[in-house]
Each structure stands twice: as structure tokens, then as C-alpha cells.
Image (cartoon, rainbow, N blue to C red):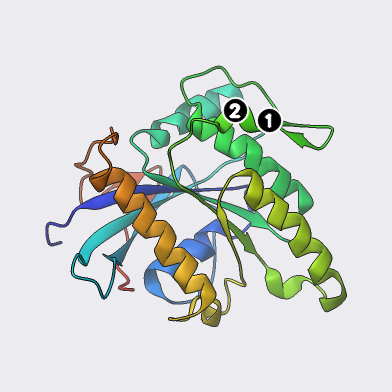
């Protein structure tokens, strides 16, 4: 690999929501034919042109860390998983639009990653309320992605998407809803592609251009975690 600056983005969400399929689509621009369960963490790389089409355009590697497991895991599993949460520059929160529980669990996933050094406090959703103060000082860019849009009946789609819009608002994040088996949802020039590019630009800005950034570079070019591998590249 050429020597390019890079950023580390976690991909978090319940097992079965389609994180591996999403990462494969983002990095390979192809549908993942036979998804399997992620054990530990799998790392894939996307090549992104920061501020594309402007005088400051520059190419970066976006490392997407697909973290396996469940928020209901034992403390020992969570402690082991915490090693993946070091030096993160952004987080993509993934939920299944047909599974309301997976949406609610995003609060717990974000809490686990952003408070990795603290003792877990449990569910962040109480009587439908979200403790926004928990993340009031969070400086890490977030993006919420809902999968399996194709599985929602047209008569239910407005109701579901209205609910998930509030979810993204809670995280002060943009929202993308798609079907990981159809690349057209991320086609160049589409609103989803624009949101995705804007998110990656923000992650890069926080890491390399803001004076208060305290992240450290230097991720190795190849990694293997519990069977996870660094795979190929996809250019925007």
C-alpha cells in the first residue's frame, strides 16, 4: 500500500443487522454474497477523496472496523472488545429497520465505545427518554445507518422512518437508510453518497485539521483480529 494518512471508523450494531454487508458494499462497491458472523473484529479499507473537487482535495484511507458481538455480552467479552475502541476517529451506528430493538441498542453501543474506560451503566433508554448529557461533550463524528429498507412494506415505511429520524437526532448525526443488497442506494451523486462523503470529510477534519484533535496516527497496513482481516480498497 502507498503511504496515505488514515482515519479509524468503528462500525457498531447488533449481530445480524448487516454490518459486514454494509462494510463490504462501502469498501468493495459490491454486494456481499454470503455474509458470515464477525468474530472479534474485521477491518476493511475504503479510499476517500477529502473535499473532492476543491483545491484542498487529498486522498485518505478510511479504516472501517466491523466489531462483532452483542451489547448483552458478558463483562469479560466487553472488556476484550474495548481494545478495538482505542484511537477512534468516527463511529457508524448500524441498525436493522425491521428490528426496533436493534435501534434502541445503538444507545448502548455508543455508550460502550465512548465510555470504554468506565464501568458500564446499562441501558441508556429509560421510559423512552435518552440521556443526551451522557454524550454532551462527545467530539467524535457519528453516522446512523438503517439497513433492510427493502423489507419494510410501503404502508409502514413512513412510520418507521419517522421513528428512526428521532434516533439520528438524538445522536446529532445524519441518517442513511438503505438495502445492502442494492448498490444503487449509494450511487455517486445520490443523497446517501453525499451524506457519506460529508461524514468521512468531517472525520478527517476532526483528526487532522482541528487544533483540539488528540488522536494518534500510525495504524499498521495489515491487521488480523480473531480471524478478521484487512481486505481490499474501494475508491469513491
Q: Is residue 221 above or below residue 128?
A: below
Q: Residue at x 19, y 64 (%)?
A: 56
Q: What secondary structure is found at the residue carrying circle 2? A: helix
Look at mark 2 in the image and give the residue it sits on: 134
Residue in front for this viewpoint, 3 or 51: 51
CA distance for labels 2 and 1 = 6 Å
Q: Residue at x 46, y 62 (%)?
A: 23
Q: Residue at x 36, y 43 (%)?
A: 89
Instruction: Answer yes or no: is residue 33 visible.
Output: no
Residue in front for this viewpoint, 2 or 56: 56
163 vs 14, left or right, is: right
Query: Horizontal and vertical percent for residue 204?
Result: 31, 52
193 vs 172, left or right, is: left
Residue at the extreme left of the image, as rendered: 3
Residue in front for this viewpoint, 38 or 216: 216
Query: Horizontal and vertical percent for residue 18?
Result: 59, 60
Callout 1 environment at 10 Å: few (<14), some (14 to 19), or many (20+)?
A: few
122 vs 160, left or right, is: left
Check residue 131 in the rendering and tell me which mark sits there, or answer none: 1
| Quarter residue 153 falls in | bottom right
121 vs 10, left or right, is: right
Mark 2–mark 1 contact, CB under 8 Å? yes
Instruction: Answer yes or no: is residue 68 visible.
Output: yes
Residue at the extreme right of the image, as rendered: 155
Check residue 82 in the rendering and tell me which mark sits there, or answer none: none
- Image quadrant containing the N terminus: bottom left
Query: Horizontal and vertical percent for residue 167?
Result: 68, 49
Q: Residue at x 64, y 33 (%)?
A: 132
Query: Horizontal and vertical percent for residue 192?
Result: 52, 71
Q: Is residue 122 above or below residue 99?
A: above
Q: How many marks?
A: 2
Amino acid at each position: 500500500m502507498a503511504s496515505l494518512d488514515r482515519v479509524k471508523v468503528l462500525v457498531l450494531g447488533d449481530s445480524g443487522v448487516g454490518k459486514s454487508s454494509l462494510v463490504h458494499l462501502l469498501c468493495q462497491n459490491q454486494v456481499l454474497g454470503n455474509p458470515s458472523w464477525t468474530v472479534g473484529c474485521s477491518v476493511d479499507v475504503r479510499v476517500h477523496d477529502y473535499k473532492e473537487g476543491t483545491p484542498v482535495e487529498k486522498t485518505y484511507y478510511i479504516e472501517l472496523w466491523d466489531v462483532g458481538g452483542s451489547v448483552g455480552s458478558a463483562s469479560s467479552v466487553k472488556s476484550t472488545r474495548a481494545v478495538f475502541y482505542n484511537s477512534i476517529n468516527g463511529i457508524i451506528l448500524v441498525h436493522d429497520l425491521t428490528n426496533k430493538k436493534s435501534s434502541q441498542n445503538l444507545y448502548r453501543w455508543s455508550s460502550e465505545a465512548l465510555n470504554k474506560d468506565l464501568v458500564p451503566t446499562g441501558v441508556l433508554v429509560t421510559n423512552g427518554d435518552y440521556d443526551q448529557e451522557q454524550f454532551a461533550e462527545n467530539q467524535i463524528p457519528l453516522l446512523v445507518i438503517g439497513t433492510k429498507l427493502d423489507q419494510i412494506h410501503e404502508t409502514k415505511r413512513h412510520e418507521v422512518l419517522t421513528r428512526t429520524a428521532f434516533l439520528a437526532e438524538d445522536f446529532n448525526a445524519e441518517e442513511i437508510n438503505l438495502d445492502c443488497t442494492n448498490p444503487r442506494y449509494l450511487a455517486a451523486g445520490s443523497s446517501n453518497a453525499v451524506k457519506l462523503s460529508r461524514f468521512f470529510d468531517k472525520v478527517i477534519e476532526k483528526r487532522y485539521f482541528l487544533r483540539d484533535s488528540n488522536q494518534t496516527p500510525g495504524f499498521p497496513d495489515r491487521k488480523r483480529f480473531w480471524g478478521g482481516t484487512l481486505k481490499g480498497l474501494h475508491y469513491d
